[in-house]
Structures are given as C-alpha cells and as structure tokens.
Image (cartoon, grey):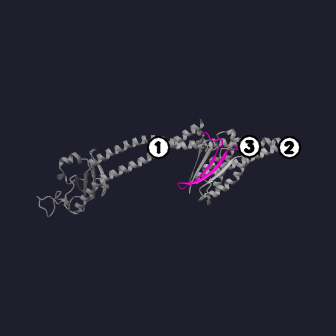
Amino acid sequence: MANRNLFRSQQLKFMVYNLIAFTVIFTIFGVIIFTQVQSTLFSKADEELKLFKEKISDDIPDMHGKGPGEGEGMDDGDPPPKEHRLNPRIIVLNWNKEGEIVNLDEMGTSFYENYLQDFSLDKSKIDTITNTVINDQYHYRYLLFEDQNTDDEIAYTQLMMNIDAEQTIIDNFGKLIIICSLIFIILSISASYILSKKMMKPIIHSWNKQGEFVENASHELRTPLTIIQNKLELLLTEPNEKIMNKFDNIALSLSETRRLSKLTSDLLTLARADSAQTELVKNPIKTDTFVSNVCAPYMEIAESQDKHFWLNLNCSIDMEVDETRLHQLLVILLDNALKYTSEHDSIGVKTYCEDHKFILEVTDTGIGIKEENIPFIFDRFYREDKARSRETGGSGLGLSIAQWIVAKHNGSIKAVRNQPKGTSFIVRLPY
C-alpha cells in the first residue's frame, strides 16, 4: 500500500512536470505566431506611412498647397504618375504649434466633428509609428513628424491610416489562439497522464525487480550461513573431539563456504553489469581450438560420471572476443548440462558458421525444461525446481550471467527443447 501511494505521488509529479512543459511550449509558440502575424499585417501599413512621409518631405507632391496627385509639371486634368499615387486610406492632419488642426477645409467639417473633435496632438510620439483608437471604435496607425517648412503655420504633420481590417484579423486570430491554447492544454492533461504512466512503468518494474533481487539474495546467502553457523557451533560443543570424527561437519561447512563464495562472486558480476562498470577486453582467438580446450576437462568429468560427451566443431575462424567472459559462458552452460543429466545421458557441443555469425550449441539429453518455463530461465534467481537446484548447488544466477556475456558481445542466446529429451542452448555471436 505504501509503495502504491509512493508510485502515485511520483506519477502525479511527472504529470505536473509534463503539463507545465507542454503549457510553456504552447504559450511560447502561440506568442511567437501571434507576434509574427501582427508584425506582418502592420508592416504594409508602416511602409505606406513611411513612403508618404518621404514624398511629403521631398515635396512630391506638395501636400501643403495642393491635393494628392497634384504637382509641378502636371496638367490639372492629367492623372498623377503611378509612382506618385498615394494610399487613399491615409489621412493627413496638419497641426500648428498650439495643437490645432489647420487643414479642416481639406478634410471637411462633418468628418472633423464626427471623428476628430476630441482628438488631440500627442507630441511625445514624434517620428514613431503608433496605434490609436478614435471614438473607442476606429483603429488607426499614425506617424507624427515636425514640419520642415518655416514659411507656413504648420508645425507638425500627422499621417493616419485606418487599420480596422488588420485589427479585426488580429482580434479574431487572438481569440483563435486562446481557444486553441485551451484545447491544447486539455489535450496536454491527457498526454501528460499517459506519458507519466508510461514513465512509471520501467520505474515500477525496476523497483519490483530490485525488491525481488534483495529478497532472493538474502535468502540464498542466509541458507549457507545458517548451515556453517550450526556446524561450527556443534564443533564448539565437543572441543576435544578429533578432526576425523567431525569430518562430515567440516566437509559440509567447506562445501557451503564454496557455494557462498560463488554466489557472492555471481552477485558482484551482475551488480557490475547493471552499473556498466565491467568492460570487455577483446582479443583474437581461434574459435574451435578455444572451445575444444575449455571442453577438455568436462569430457573427463562426464566420462567419470558414465556420460557421453561429444564434440562437433565446424567453425574454425579468428574472432575478437573477451576470452575470460567467453570461457565463463561455456563453463556455465557445461556445468548446467552436467548437473541436469544422469548416467548414460549425452552431452554435446557443436559449432558452425551461419550468416556471418559464430554459432555455439550446447546440447544434453537430461531432464530438460518445461516449455512454459523456457521464457523465464534467464531471470535472476529463477529455478524450475528449487529443491533439486539446491541439491546441485544452483543459485539461479548462471544463465543471467550467460545472457549478459552474450549481450555484451552483441549476440543472442536462447534455449530450446531437445528431441527426444533434454535441452539445447544456442548462442549466436557476430564476427
């Protein structure tokens, strides 16, 4: 129950972190898009205002005394050249030093009374393109600059361009961005929940594996320690006895000590493998010669146990491997074959090359593995028959180490049922 609450708390944290990350990303993305759209919509209006100012400053046409399109060298009835035509959306306001509009006649009294009567001159925005709203309804973008002609009463010229269309687009786009952001946030909550759940799966799996590993390791270590302690305590009760009379107790203690030493060594190997502290030292070997040398002592052991040991080596190639780890792999597979075979059973080692891979098969005709248990035999501390494994000294770590060795060589290992009985381990290593 405590673990479940801990996992839920951690999952909630992951969900919140993911939601914050998504929200920040969507917010930044929305702000960038909105800013770019706004800038793009206003860029054309800004260009028109600046161009209008340049034409006024160059007196082409002279906007102080003549209407748009009129100028020197042009007849009154002729249309102005295309390059001299000005944007009809732009309104020109001429101000005197007292802040009064001096070109009311050109704009019309009705226009002034309806729209500009409450509009005042703001001298703080000179030479800066600025937004303004007239009558709380109409949006304009204007450019105010000082008049350079000292012969008239005009002190400032203000170019105003209506941007109601652009502002409507921006307002609608802003609403769309807000609606989309809300939808994205809702989707982000769902995505954050799914991602946090997926992120917790390997953590929960590792947690369970760690708990199982500690429990199994403690059990495996406790058993030989208990046996050794009991036998030593028995020896202490009879200190005057001869060693030969207590031979069985001493022998069993030594046997359990050796098993304990092997178990701690296997645990250390797996711990280093998990932390990636163990690196392979690869050297070239002659594969069949290497396999033959490793198998030689096991052939003698098999012969002493009335078992048939055969070799079929057909892949004599040079290969870069970690000789120590490959030797350990073969020892694990051959030890298992000897442990789980009886008199007159057969043990065989076969090598061959296939698809640029070195194939090693270790086969026996022993008790075999049940089909439903094959997927679990490489799990740590897994034993198909725990009582029988304890009798043979197995701890359930050997095949886990074998799988790690093969994986470090970028290979694969699998177990299949041998016909008519027994097991075959097939190792594939690239070369």
Quarter of the image for the N terminus: give it.
top right
| Kind of residue sitting beneath label 1 | Leu
**Res. 224 mark:** 3
Read off the residue under disc 2: 245
| Kind of residue sitting beneath label 3 | Pro
Real-space Cα separation, disc 2 to disc 1, in angstroms: 74 Å
Q: Is residue 64 above or below residue 119?
A: below
Q: Residue at x 17, y 50 (%)?
A: 108
Residue 231 lies within the magenta run: no
Q: Is residue 208 above or below residue 314?
A: above
**Res. 19 mark:** 1
The residue nearer to you, when weighing 266 against 184, is: 266
In percent of width and height, residue 69 lies at: 17, 58
| Kind of residue sitting beneath label 2 | Asn
**Mark 3 residue crowding within 10 angstroms, few (<14) / some (14–19) / many (20+):** some
Real-space Cα separation, disc 2 to disc 3, in angstroms: 22 Å
Secondary structure at badge 2 equals helix
The residue nearer to you, when weighing 400 against 225, is: 400
**Mark 1 residue crowding within 10 angstroms, few (<14) / some (14–19) / many (20+):** many
Dot placed on the residue nearer the N-terminal end, 2 or 3: 3
In percent of width and height, residue 71 lies at: 16, 61
The residue nearer to you, when weighing 38 against 162, is: 38
**Which residue occupies the extreme top position in the image?**
1
Dot placed on the residue nearer the N-terminal end, 2 or 1: 1
In percent of width and height, residue 94 lies at: 22, 55
Q: Residue at x 41, y 43 (%)?
A: 184
Provide the residue span drawn in magenta.
Answer: 342-370
Secondary structure at badge 1 equals helix
Q: Quadrant of residue 66?
A: bottom left
Secondary structure at badge 3 equals helix
